[in-house]
Amino acid sequence: MSSLVFLISMGLVIYFLLQGDKQDRLDRQQAEDDKKTLAKQSKAK
Amino acid sequence: MKDLIFLLMFLPFVILALRNPFIGLCGWIWTIMAIPNNMLWGFASDIRFTYVIALATIIGMIFDKDPFRKPLFNGLFVLMVLFLLQCAISNTFTLGTGVASWAVWSDFFKAILFSGLCMMLLTTKNRIETFLIVLLLGAGFNIFFEGLKFLVSLGNYKIIGIQNSMMTDNNLFALAILMVLPLYMYMIPQARHKYLKLGFTGLAGLAAVCVIGSFSRGGFVGLLIVGWRIFLKVKRKFVFILFTLIFASSAIYVASDKWTDRIQTIDNAKEDDSFLGRVTAWKLATLAAMDRPFIGAGQDSVQHGWVWAYYYSDIQKFDFITDRNTPIEHPKASHSIYFQVLGDTGFIGLLLFLLILGKSLLLSKQLTIDAKQAWISNLGKSINTSLLVYLISGGLLSLAYYDLIYAMVSMLICLKQINQSIVIK
C-alpha cells in the first residue's frame, strides 16, 4: 500500500516537473524574444 | 522489483536535471523531504539519491545557458558562508570526536550549497512554484502516512519521526511539518489544478494531525502560532473558528488522555524531568561557550560523554536558575537551536546565526509591504510564519543546521530579486 502511494506521488512529482520544465522553456523563449525586440528597437533608433 | 521501478522513475529526475538545472533543485528538495531510501529495501536502498541529483544539477549548470540565472553576491549568502566557515574553524579544534563534528559539517555544507544554488536558479515565479509543489509533495508523503496511522489507530500510534533524515524524532518532525504548513496555505489558492488544491488542503489538515500525534509540546506551541497567523489571514474568520473547534476537539478526543497529560506538563516545566534535562544541556552549552568564546566546543560535541562530564564539573555556576540537573552519566542534545549553535561554535557563531535569522525575518516582513505582486506578498507572509515558528519552537529543539530553513532564506532572496525586477507599467 505505502509503496503504491509512494510511486503514485513520485509520478505526480514527475508530472509537475515536466509542467514546470515546459513553462520554463516558454519563459526562456519569451526572454529571448524580448531581447531581440529590444536590440532591433535600439538599432532602429 | 520495486527498487527497479523506483530507479526507472528516478531516471527522469536526472535527465531533466541535466537538461534544466532548476528541475534538479526540485528533485534535490524532493529527496530531502520524501526520503526515498526509507521506501527501498533492495539494491537501490544504498544509493545516495541526493548526491546523484546534486551532481546532475551541477553538471547541468555548467552546460546550460540560463538567461534567468542570478549572481550569488548578497548579504545573506555571505553570512551563511561565514557561519559555515566558523563551524569549520570550531570543528578543527573540536573537543568531541572529529568524525562526528565533520559529519554534521558535511551535511551543513550541502545545505548551504543547496541554498546558494536556489538563489541562483529559482529566479522566476514558475520556478519557485514548481519547487514548492515538489517540496510539498515530498513532505506530503510522510505527512500522509504518519497522519493516517495516527487517525486509524485512534491516537494509539505515536509519531516518532522519519528515519535517515534530520526529522529523526517526534519533536524535530513536528517542527519540520510546522515549517511547511504555511507553504501549504500559500499553495492552496495558488494551485491551478483542482485536485492539487484539494490534495494540499487534505495534507495541511493531516499536517496539523501529525503535530498533535507527535506529542511534542514545542510542536503544539508552534501549531498555535501557525493557527493564529492563518486566522489573521483568512477572510471567513467565523468558518475558520468553527472548523478549528471541530478539528481540535476531534483530534484531542482521538489523541486520548495521554496527549492532554503530556501537553499539560508545559504548566509544570519546573517539575518535568524532560524539561530539566534540556535546561542542563543549555547550561553546559553556555559553559562550553564561556570556556571557548570564539570557537565553541565543535559541532555535535557538548553531548559527547567526556565533554559533557568536563563541563558538568562547573554546572553549579548556574544553580541560581535551578539546582536540579540531569545526572552526569546522561548526556543530552542541546534541544534549542540557540544553545546548539552557542555550544558548537561559540559567541561568534551564535552572532552569525542570529544575523541570518534576523535579516531573513526582516526581509520577509519587508517583502509583505513592498511586494509589487500579490503572490510575492503572500509567499513572503508564509515564509515569515515559517521563520517565526522556527524561531519560537526551535528554542526547544536542536535543528540549527536544517536544510529547509536555509532553503527558505534563499527563497526570500529570490523573491526580493524578482520583486526588484518587476517593472510596473
Image (tube, rainbow, N blue to C red):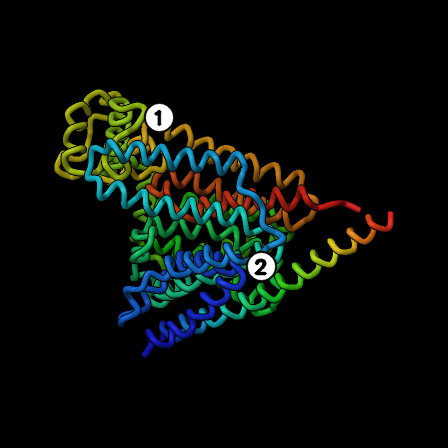
Q: Are marks 2 and 1 on the same chain?
A: yes
Callout in the foreground (2, 1): 1
- Give the chain of mark 2: B
The label on residue B347 is 1
Residue B266 falls in which quadrant of the image? top left
Residue B96 falls in which quadrant of the image? top left
Relative horizontal placement of residue B148, taking residue B378 as reference (left or right): left
Secondary element type, mark 1: helix
Which residue sits at x=43%, y=46%? B113
Relative horizontal placement of residue B27, taking residue A1 as reference (left or right): right
Outermost residue toward the bottom in this view: B1
Residue B364 picture location, percent across and down: 57, 40
- Give the chain of mark 1: B
- In depth, the one of B405 and B228 nearer the eye is B405
Outermost residue toward the left in this view: B329
Q: Is residue B137 above or below residue B231?
A: below
Q: Is residue B31 above or below residue B419?
A: below
Which residue sits at x=18%, y=33%? B308
Secondary element type, mark 2: helix
Residue B93 picture location, percent across and down: 24, 31
Which residue sits at x=37%, y=43%? B401
- Amino acid found under the numbered disc labelled 1: Phe
The label on residue B188 is 2
The label on residue B308 is none
Q: Which is more N-terminal, label 1 or label 2?
A: 2
Which residue sits at x=49%, y=49%? B117
The reply to whether the C-beta atoms of the residues labelled 2 and 1 are less than 8 Å apart is no
